[in-house]
Amino acid sequence: MKYFLIIFTSLILFGCDDKTNNNNHSIIGKEFRRFNEIESLLNYTKISDTVIYGNSFEPKHRILHLRDKRNNLILLKSITLDSRNEDKIYKILDTLIIPNLNKPEFITIGYCQLNEENDENLIAIVDKTDSLKIQNIRKLWRANIVTNKIEAVNNLNGINCFNEWFSE
C-alpha cells in the first residue's frame, strides 16, 4: 500500500502538466530585434511601443502592444545591446493577453498618472472620450520593472488617464 501511495503521488505531481500555462508563456524568454522574428507573432500588428525610462537616462524596458484578429498582446521586454554594442536586443519578460475590445473602449499605455505623477508603467483599458481626461478606467495593470511582471492593479484611487488622441 505504501508503494502504491508513492507511485500515485509521483504520477499526480510529475505526470500532470498545465498545457495552457506552457502555451501562454512559450514566448517568455525569447529574444529578438524585431517582434516578427518570432514565428508565433507573425500574425500580429504593432499598435504602440512605449519606452520605460524609470530612473535611468538609458531605457532598460519597453512595453510593446500588438494586436491580431482576436486579441491584444502586451509584451514587457528588456533592452540590451548585442556584443558589438550596435543593435538593441529585446527579451520578452512577461505577457498580457486582452481579448479585442468593444468599440467604445481602448488600451492606453503610458498616459496615466498615479497621484498626479506620470507613470509610464501603467496599462489601462479605458472608455473612449472626446475630452482630455478619461472619465472611466475599466481595468489597470502595472509593468513592474523590479519583478519583470505585468501585475493587476485593483485600487484605482489616485489614478488619472489622459486621452492620447485628444485635440482641441
Image: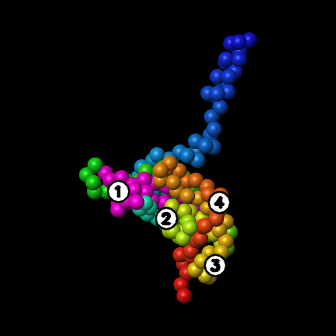
Provide the secondary structure element on which disc 1 rests: strand
The image position of residue 131, as x and y in percent, is 61, 82
Taking the spot 58% from the left edge, 80% from the top edge, the residue there is 132
Label 2 vs label 3: CA separation? 21 Å
Q: Amino acid at mark 1?
A: Lys
The region drawn magenta spans 55-82
Above or below residue 147? Residue 9 is above
Q: Earlier in the sequence, mark 2 or mark 3?
A: 2
Q: Which residue is mark 2?
A: 120
Q: Which residue is mark 1?
A: 88
Give SS at disc 2. loop
Residue 90: where, in percent of width, then height? Answer: 41, 53
- In-image side of 62 versus 107 (left or right): left
Give x and y (percent) for residue 144. Answer: 51, 54
Q: Amino acid at mark 2?
A: Glu
Q: Amino acid at mark 4?
A: Asn
Residue under numbered circle 3: 129
Between disc 3 and disc 4, whose residue precedes? 3
Q: Which residue is mark 4?
A: 155
Eye-nearest disc, 3 or 4: 4
Q: CA distance from mark 3 to mark 1?
A: 36 Å
Q: Is residue 69 something one can see in this rendering? A: no
